[in-house]
């Protein structure tokens, strides 16, 4: 296992501002790489399926918002336990941290199995309810059904990775997620396309393939999730210095742990449910615009992911840093690190927004050979580019609040701006100016939301409420 990069914090050492910044970067870079690898998997699926035609792309785009909804709700329960792991390690209570790890994994597995069954049942009626054309409904059902059955493995992968990160090891989960990306390429190439001959100079290679098309993309992703969930659990439960299973008797109350986990996770679950529901409603707003708009919207969301994934990586680092700082009772450091992480996230995502604006056409060309999809997708991406700094503020500040165990405020801000700004404006503009109206509404909502997060973090740090906690 890699060296614990947060030991200095628990040991009471004082670092200069420059050293603290480098610490944030050391924690963030592996997390950013892990997040980018996740988006790369979406790129792989989208690009490979994109070469099957607009209908195949639209079938995935139709249900993509629902996969985010179900995945967000399923993984939310894990956050309540990972935050408690960070707090206990920060307080030097390693035995209790191990108990929280075991109880958390059991809870995540139980809840994710329930969600998998519910989603599998939903998959047969979902595409028609979303308003998808008849020719894409069957493929959409297959894709969502396979995704649903893989939910327990995705949830365990997420939970185990989060616990390893909160123990101070950000590097290992990122390496496993990059491995998952590589496996996704291999599995997809074998499952999406039929057996074919590839010529490399004078060499002719026969590449085997199952020819499953859209279903193959879902199955390839599922198999990579299964493999890497096993790896993540191995390194958490067998190899982790602080959290591996061992014979010991540590008194702790599962009831109290679950109660605290629900206090942290329920606002996140509600936020993911209502935000995800809003994305589903957004899909229904886009669906009447036709298959080209559905595919362009889905591809553009995937392309934009490369811009905001650095923000989510820094957010993961912020959760670990703030969680352990609070556990170690280092209040001044907590405030300083909060603003340093948010500032770094805004700086990096501002630069990514510039790159997004410049290279939007090239990004869409990678994802789809269809010229109409490329032009429409690039134009809406350039609208979104202007909102990236404020998007960063909301993402990283939410990670700070999560590390402090304060999730209700971020839930309230995300939901109010989504339902009071984005959706009403998108519903008004879409019939008038098409997909551009949906993305104008999105950019405006992200700007308002980011501003609210900055004001909230300023208030929480100024009044010393950020460091209040319940363990």
Image: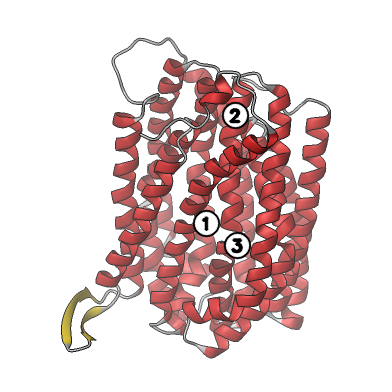
What label does residue 439 carry, if any? none
Question: The N terminus appears in which quarter of the rendering?
Answer: top left
The vertical placement of 423 against 104, above or below, is below
Way the structure is coloured: secondary structure
The answer to whether 412 appears left or right of 29 in the picture is right
Looking at the rendered structure, the number of numbered marks drawn on it comes to 3
Circle 3 residues within 10 Å: few <14, some 14–19, many ≥20 = many
Q: CA distance from mark 2 to mark 3?
A: 26 Å
User: Of marks 2 and 1, which one's residue comes earlier in the chain?
Assistant: 1
Label 1 sits on residue? 68
Q: Give the numbered dot on residue 307.
A: 3
In this rendering, the label closer to the viewer, 2 or 1: 2
Find the distance from the CA under tag 1 to the CA under tag 3: 18 Å
Seen in the image, is 133 located left or right of residue 417?
left
Could you tell which of marks 1 and 3 lies nearer the N-terminus? 1
Q: Secondary structure at mark 1?
A: helix
Q: Secondary structure at mark 2?
A: helix
């Amino acid at each position: 296992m890699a060296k614990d990069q947060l030991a200095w914090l628990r040991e009471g050492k004082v670092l200069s501002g420059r050293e603290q910044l480098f610490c944030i970067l050391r924690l963030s870079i592996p997390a950013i790489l892990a997040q980018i690898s996740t988006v790369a998997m979406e790129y792989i699926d989208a690009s490979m399926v994109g070469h099957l035609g607009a209908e195949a792309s639209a079938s995935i785009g139709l249900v993509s918002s629902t996969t985010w909804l179900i995945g967000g709700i399923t993984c939310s329960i894990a956050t309540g336990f990972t935050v408690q792991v960070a707090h206990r390690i920060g307080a030097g209570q390693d035995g209790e941290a191990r108990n929280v790890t075991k109880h958390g994994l059991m809870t995540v597995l139980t809840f994710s199995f329930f969600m998998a069954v519910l989603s599998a049942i939903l998959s047969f009626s979902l595409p028609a309810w979303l308003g998808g054309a008849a020719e894409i409904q069957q493929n959409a059902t297959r894709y969502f059904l396979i995704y649903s059955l893989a939910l327990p493995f995705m949830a365990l992968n997420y939970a185990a990775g989060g616990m390893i990160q909160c123990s101070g090891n950000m590097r290992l989960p990122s390496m496993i997620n990059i491995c998952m990306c590589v496996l996704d390429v291999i599995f997809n190439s074998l499952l999406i396309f039929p057996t074919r001959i590839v010529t490399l100079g004078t060499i002719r290679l026969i590449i085997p393939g199952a020819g499953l098309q859209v279903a193959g993309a879902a199955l390839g992703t599922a198999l990579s999730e299964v493999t890497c969930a096993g790896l993540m659990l191995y390194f958490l439960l067998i190899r982790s210095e602080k959290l591996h299973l061992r014979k010991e008797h540590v008194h702790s109350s599962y009831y109290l742990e679950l109660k605290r986990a629900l206090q942290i996770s329920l606002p996140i679950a509600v936020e993911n449910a209502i935000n995800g529901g809003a994305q589903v409603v957004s899909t229904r707003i886009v669906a009447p615009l036709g298959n080209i708009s559905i595919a362009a919207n889905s591809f553009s969301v995937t392309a934009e992911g490369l811009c905001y994934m650095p923000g989510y990586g820094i957010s993961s680092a912020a959760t670990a840093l703030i969680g352990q700082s609070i556990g170690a009772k280092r209040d001044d450091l907590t405030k300083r690190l909060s603003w340093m992480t948010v500032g770094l996230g805004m700086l990096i995502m501002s630069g990514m927004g510039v790159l997004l604006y410049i290279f939007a056409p090239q990004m869409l060309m990678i994802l789809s050979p269809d010229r109409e999809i490329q032009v429409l997708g690039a134009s809406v991406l350039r609208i979104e580019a202007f909102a990236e700094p404020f998007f960063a503020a909301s993402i990283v500040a939410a990670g700070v609040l999560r590390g402090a165990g304060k999730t209700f405020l971020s839930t309230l801000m995300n939901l109010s701006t989504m339902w009071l700004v984005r959706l009403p404006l998108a519903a008004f503009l879409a019939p008038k100016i098409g997909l551009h109206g949906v993305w104008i509404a999105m950019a405006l909502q992200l700007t308002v939301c980011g501003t609210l997060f900055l004001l909230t973090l300023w208030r929480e740090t100024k009044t010393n409420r950020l460091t209040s906690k319940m363990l």
